[in-house]
Amino acid sequence: MTLPRPLTGVRVLDFTWVRAGPWATRWLGAFGAEIIKIEWPENLDILRSNRMVIPPGVEPGPNAPGQFADTNVNKRGITLNVRTPKGLEIARRLAALSDIVMENFSSRVMQKWGLGYEDLKKLRPDIIYVSMAGFGHTGRNHHYTTFGPVAQAVSGLTFISGLPDKPPAGWGWSYMDDTGGMYGAMCVLTGLYHRNMTGQGQHIDQAQMIASIPLTGPALLDFTVNGRASRRDGFPPGNRAHWPGTPLVNNYRGPTVAPHNTYRTHAGDYNDWCVIVCHSDVEWQRLVQVMGHPAWATSPKFATLAGRLEHQEEMDEGIETWSMTLDKYELTERCQAAGVRALPVQSSEDRVEHDPQLRHRQMYLEMEHPALGVRKIQNAPFKLSETPAVNHLPSPLIGQHTREIVEGLLGFSHEELLAGYVDGTLWPITRARYAYMEEMLR
């Protein structure tokens, strides 16, 4: 028996692009919402461009990039030129039939097209309209354009990332997009709940840059509570609790845990590492037992946190001498069995192909894509016992569902569909059409 999904019957008109917006609608689709993604090839989504990574053996083009395929599952796609009167009218008719409209352009774009909240509220008074502009729709900078790494910079994240006396490093991935997308999905669910209770829609104004501020929480607390500004006067705190030559201050970078480091494992290759953390003296004694009580580890100078911090270099050298004798997964099993916090450092290949817990949780499931073939796609990182989230549609080929939506949902005749391709409403006149479009038109 197929279990119901909580958003079945909810329709989302998706004007989003790149990552943050599509990431939000992706998860709404996993919960059962019908997502109609509007695109126009003359303003191609960056994730559809040939600048993105294309799987080997796949013909380049807007249907080839893997990141678009992963970011846009659970959606149907239509191509539509909203800059024309006919295209705008189709978009407005779709909005009138939708529960939610989502967009992540800068604040002036949708209003300029005549598709802003005030415009669409006249067509459907209870519409939930979610805007995800970089700086929101109010304030001095609301019209600024932005991008994930740009938002990271102004949020404060870039400044606190990097090595001392070096330029700010920034983050290796655009976390603002993923964080913003999850906030976007949360906004939709909140808006739906409000509408179910009151019958009223609303405009939800989410600023992607401001949504990143909570990620700087420790630095914010250090400033507001301790009076210390953000700084990079020590090495990043992710591996070691304390680095030589840095001040011993009791804050989020301070001497709270030791050992707390990443250690090489057998066979010492690029991907052979394991993190080991001992939060207490008791846990340290457990690690000593796992290591076989080597003479150096039983010295009284390592018995307390203060001693382990003072002699951290010697301690880390001793731990790594032992860790190099074990595979990272075997080391993890031994430590976890003894109550020591240890986990392997995993690459993408490790996570997708080798992690037994992720496999059990079905985090990466195969899905057949019409252009990419069978590929593993990210599944929901949570489980609902009665209304599961499920990837049920591969990402759409560009314009793949135009006929299905224009004829099936809006009730256009096939002749009207053909006319939309002839006059450039549904596909640019100067661009060649794909084989699946020709089949659709026949």
Image (tube, helix red, strand yellow):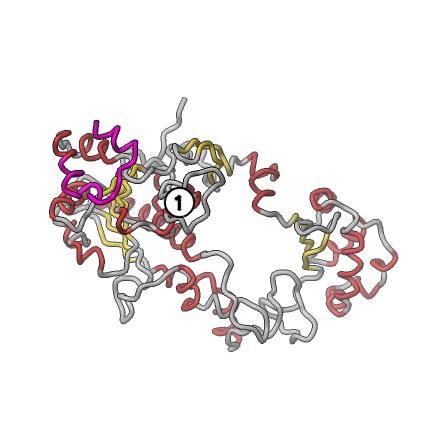
Give how far across and how far down residue 77 sits, in percent: 29, 39
**Quick one: quadrant of the C terminus?**
top left
Whole-percent x, y for residue 359 in the image: 56, 35
Which residue extends farthest right? Answer: 295
Q: Nearer the viewer, residue 102 or 408?
A: 408
Residue at position x 41%, y 68% in the image = 154
Q: Point out the stretch of residues depicted in magenta.
A: 419-442
Q: What residue type is disc 1 on?
A: Phe
Q: Is residue 23 visible?
A: yes
Q: Could one spot residue 197 in this view of the protein?
A: no
Q: Quadrant of residue 276?
A: bottom right
Counting every numbered tag in the picture gives 1
- Identify the image quadrant of the N terminus: top left
Left or right: where does residue 220 sit relative to residue 15?
Answer: right
Rendering coords of residue 229 (x, y %): 50, 76
**Residue 235 at x, y = what percent?**
62, 69
Residue that label 1 marks: 68
Q: Is residue 212 above or below residue 440?
A: below
